[in-house]
Image (spheres, rainbow, N blue to C red):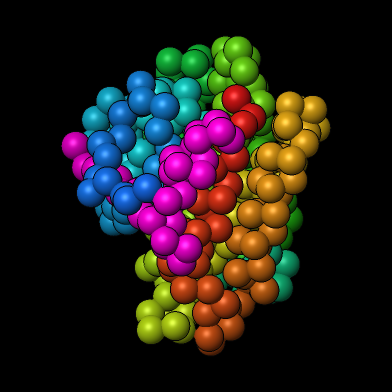
Amino acid sequence: MKKRKIWAGLSTAVLVAAPAASQATILHAPPPAGIEAKADQPLLHLAQHQGHAAPAATAGGEGEGEGGGAAQLEPSLHLYRGIEMIRGHLLVGAELIEAGRWADALPHFLHPEEEIYASIRDQLKTFNVAPFQVALKALSQTVKAKNQEAYARARAALDERLAAAETAVKAKEENGPYFVLETALEVLQQAADEYEEAVEKGRIANVVEYQDARGFVLEVDRLVGTVMPAATAKNVDAAKALQASLNELKATFPSVTPPKQAVKDSGEFLSSVSKFELQLGNLR
């Protein structure tokens, strides 16, 4: 099983989610060399980059790529993570289509099927969710064809399938708002991986990875917005800090077309994700 590291230091900090009373101790404690991520541990960590091949991983096994990077998660969290990552790809792909850049958009419609779907197929069965691989393929075909009308129909059909999957998963969660925030962190972990791959010597060297990270961050912002009232009722200060960390991350991506010079280095990006992670202990 792969291990995920917890880093210390302002520019590369990844902090374990913990109650407020113990945060000061965490901030000044020397970092452990590595902590093995397991679903039954209360630790939330940032994943190291896992590559881009996509074998059919399940929640209990190993896997590579966007779908398999968190294959050790509980089935519900693994599935919800996958759904939101698909939405992130569609979000940034839609931005590119709106700009008339169909060819640039295509990778973001291919990745959901190529890198994510195989890893969540078994969880779809577990939660009695109808498969939607055909809908994913149909959508990517409309993008290849640059057919706006067909794209709109295929996108609506897929969105309906994704919404049904989200509803089925959340229906079995006792603490829905916290589950959504856990999922958001998992997606931000993948965004950090993508952003690390995008940046080289302070410049955006890989545009697709930059756009992947942008899509994931913007999708997390939307997702967190759905539970922000509940989070605010739970702990107003933690909710504000959570949103502030998301605002920092969104500022990393001034537009869907990346600037030549990166707004943040990967360590600074991780630091912003760690601020999000730190608040989860206060919102359980």
Question: Can residue 203 be seen at all in this image of the molecule?
Answer: yes
Residue 256 versus residue 86 in the image, above or below: below
Q: Position of residue 73 (x, y in %)?
A: 37, 29
Predominant SS along the magenta part: loop
The residue lying toward the viewer, choosing from 9 and 230, is: 9
In reply to whether residue 215 is colored magenta, the answer given is no
Q: Is residue 272 left or right of residue 248?
A: left
Residue drawn at (32%, 56%), measured in percent from left and top?
49
Residue drawn at (64%, 62%), measured in percent from left and top?
248
Q: Quadrant of the N terminus?
A: top left
- Where are the magenta residues, as a range? 1-28
Residue 281 versus residue 191 in the image, above or below: above
Q: Is residue 76 left or right of residue 229?
A: left
Q: Position of residue 208 (x, y in %)?
A: 47, 69
In reply to whether residue 15 is colored magenta, the answer given is yes
Q: Quadrant of residue 235?
A: top right
Residue drawn at (62%, 18%), measured in percent from left and top?
175
The residue lying toward the viewer, choosing from 145 and 282, is: 282
Q: Is residue 125 left or right of residue 165?
A: left
Q: Position of residue 65 (x, y in %)?
A: 33, 50
Residue drawn at (52%, 53%), measured in percent from left and top?
273
Q: Position of residue 143 (x, y in %)?
A: 58, 60
Q: Quadrant of residue 36?
A: top left
Question: Can residue 185 be seen at all in this image of the molecule?
Answer: no
Q: Is residue 255 left or right of residue 105?
A: right
- Count the labels in the image: 0
The residue lying toward the viewer, choosing from 2 and 9, is: 9
